[in-house]
Image (tube, grey):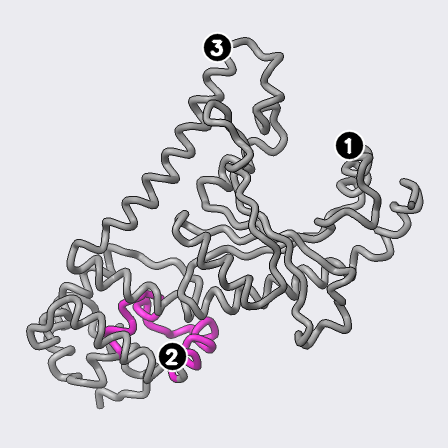
Amino acid sequence: MTTLEEARKLWLKEQPVYREFGIYLADKLKAEIRRQGILADITSRSKDIDSVIKKLILKPEHTYESLGDKTGVRAIVRYKDEITPVLEIAERLFQRGDPENTSGRLKPNTFGYLSVHADVRLLAGDEQISKFPSAKFAAELQVRTLAQHLWAEMAHDSIYKYDALLAPLPNPLQRRIYILAGVVELADEEFNQIEREMPSVAELSVLKSLERHYFKLTVRRSDPQLSLDVIRLLSPLYEQKTPAQIIEHLNDFFTKHEDVLQDVYGKAEEMPDRSVFLFQPEALMIYDRLETDPLSVREAWSGHFPDRELERMANVFGFSFD
């Protein structure tokens, strides 16, 4: 069993390797999540020396060797419905332990930190397994929503991080904290439910479908109002197709042109003269219509948006208006 002083020396030596391990896991997870069209913020971190020593002091049942979260990977998604797909991706990429939802620890009349945790290690066939053998290198994967992350960050250094810590506080103050925690959790549920119901609106259903492809190409945020304006403008060019038929057509178009799109977006950040519409989900729709009927697109576009922006979009995808 290592002493605290021995643990300190070991971690100062090993921490850079664990940091590299976390970065490798995060990069691998980030690439696959993007391929699935999920917008998520993926980060990694290895514990600093103070965190390791504090944990060993507060949890004497642990040894340096038994600490399971020397490094961690965090995935922050927008909606609760996106947590399970991220966990499924992690299960395909890594040796993933059973997920633990921290809400399962809470009684109905208590509150606390909300997140889903799972241990991850490299698979036997991973190209980096010799460098990060699974017998030694494990990381804690945390998956949470933006609302859950808000609560976790605000509560991290505060007395109201855990329900048990509230006991010494006056009842009115405890009640205010309970109400605040409930509001955050309710907001999380409502955002998730609204997202489920949103696609019932025609142009929004097209936008949501376009976003799933867009986030396979980039994590840049877009302007949804501009997206809806372009979708309304170009939808009539689909020869009276229903929104569902337009979505099916664009899904097929993306599959057939994914290599071109990946190449364009791989270079897009270095294009100083790119169109502002390139980093919009409807760029796929513009590309599709330019390939199918460029004259109709130009006629519809003119007078609504700058002609030069459409010309830039055409040029980036290999079309010329000359």
Q: Which residue is mark 3?
A: 172
Q: CA distance from mark 3 to mark 2?
A: 56 Å
Q: Residue at x 46, y 17 (%)?
A: 176
The magenta segment: 260-287
Q: Is residue 193 magenta?
A: no
Q: Nearer the viewer, mark 3 or mark 2?
A: 3
Per the image, label 1 sits on a secondary structure element best described as helix
Per the image, label 3 sits on a secondary structure element best described as helix
Q: Residue flagged by tag 2: what amino acid is it? A: Leu
Q: Earlier in the sequence, mark 1 or mark 3?
A: 1
Q: Position of residue 300 (x, y in %)?
A: 11, 73
- Mark 2: give few (<14), some (14-19) or many (20+) Cα within 10 Å: some
Q: Which residue is mark 1?
A: 58
Q: Earlier in the sequence, mark 3 or mark 2?
A: 3
**In this view of the protein, which residue sits in the foreground, 46 or 58?**
58
Q: Residue at x 17, y 84 (%)?
A: 294
Q: Earlier in the sequence, mark 1 or mark 2?
A: 1
Q: Is residue 272 magenta?
A: yes
Q: Nearer the viewer, mark 1 or mark 3?
A: 1
Q: Residue at x 71, y 57 (%)?
A: 138
- Mark 3: give few (<14), some (14-19) or many (20+) Cα within 10 Å: few
Q: Which residue is mark 2?
A: 261
Q: Residue at x 21, y 77 (%)?
A: 249
